[in-house]
DNA sequence: GAAATCAGTATACATAAGGAAACTAGTTAC
DNA sequence: GTAACTAGTTTCCTTATGTATACTGATTTC
């Protein structure tokens, strides 16, 4: 599928291949979107709960990123009109479709960690 | 592997799962690292050649990102002492280990594109 | 001889992303 | 009555990212 050699090639071939890769990156950009999605894979969560679980995230970033994820239909926001109001976030089926990608990210991260161990 | 339910769970479980995911994200952060790697999957390249192939990247960003990728041993920089000097960038075997991840990114991007088509 | 190419670096600037802390308004626990 | 919790928003600030232009020193092309 991808050339292994050193020879010249058609730059359009690469650009065409790259386009959908960049589409994904545009939607998952930044430091927090994937961690937020992973957090919701483990169950529905309330705002503060997520903030506690995802180490280092601020309320501002969490709020902003959740809005973007909601717009892209990866995450769903549900308000229960109890008093005080309860807001629950959950993963959508579309958000679940990132499962394979996230598995790959995780397994590469594990390999990388092992590699660093060996070196030091 | 990942819970489907809504029930409460141990936040440590999620944090542990998340750690290697975040390790990967730290190394592949930003808009350009993955596109640079993909470009080199298609063959060794010279600086200007890459700049032409990766649409939108500036010399400054390309230079900066290549340095970071080199530090992490995902990309190799080779200088030929011809006149004028020729500098060639290539993917390392370690860089190749991102192949599955990039395939997933690409196939998710393709799905996403299809989905957007249906909607409009 | 002028222009373009190569592999970047330097400078100045503008915008985006991210972080720290305070704050809201209502509720519950002590 | 005081403190803490909830779901965020607001403000101020610092980095990071991106843009634009000019520059290097040698070489090839017209």
Image (cartoon, coloured by chain):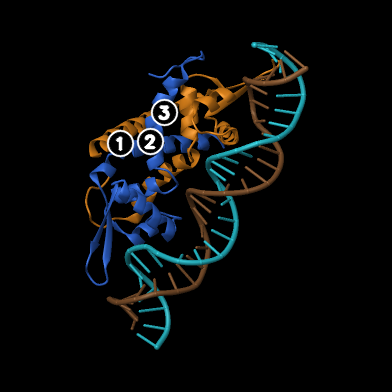
Chain colours: A blue, B orange, C brown, D cyan
Instruction: Say which chain tag 3 marks.
Output: A
Work out whether B106 lies above or below A74.
above
Q: Chain of mark 2?
A: A
Label 2 element class:
helix
Identify the residue under disc 1: B112
Q: Residue at x 26, y 65 (%)?
A: A86
Residue C4 located left or right of residue B40: right
Question: Within 10 Å of the Cα at label 2, are there few (<14), some (14-19), or many (20+) other Cα atoms?
Answer: some
Cβ–Cβ under 8 Å for marks 2 and 1: yes
Q: Residues within 10 Å of mark 1 (few under 14, many from 20)?
A: some
Q: What residue is rendered at 45% in x and 41% in y?
A: B25
User: Where's residue C30, x and y in %?
Assistant: 34, 81
- Can you identify the residue that label 2 sits on? A23
Q: Does dot 1 land on a helix, a strand or a loop?
A: helix
Tell me if I can see residue A107 in this picture: no
Name the residue nearer the viewer: B76 or B112.
B112
**Disc with the residue nearer the chain's start (3 vs 2):** 3
Q: Is residue B80 left or right of residue B93?
A: right
Marks 2 and 1 sit apart, C-alpha to C-alpha, by 8 Å
Q: Against A68, is B65 above or below?
A: above
**Nearer the observer, A36 or D17:** D17
Residue identifier under label 3: A18
- Say whether mark 1 and mark 3 are on the same chain: no
Q: Quadrant of residue B110?
A: top left
Residue D6 position, x and y percent, is 32, 67
> Residue A89, located in which quarter of the rendered image?
bottom left
């Amino acid at each position: 599928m991808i050339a292994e050699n050193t020879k010249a090639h058609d730059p359009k071939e690469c650009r065409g291949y790259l386009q959908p890769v960049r589409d994904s990156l545009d939607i998952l950009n930044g430091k927090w979107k994937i961690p937020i999605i992973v957090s919701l894979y483990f169950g529905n969560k309330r705002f503060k709960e997520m903030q506690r679980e995802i180490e280092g995230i601020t309320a501002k970033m969490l709020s902003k990123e959740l809005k973007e994820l909601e717009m892209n239909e990866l995450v769903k926001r549900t308000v229960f009109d109890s008093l005080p109001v309860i807001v629950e976030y959950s993963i959508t089926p579309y958000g679940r479709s990132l499962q394979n990608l996230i598995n790959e990210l995780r397994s590469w991260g594990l390999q990388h960690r092992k590699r660093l161990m060996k070196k030091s």
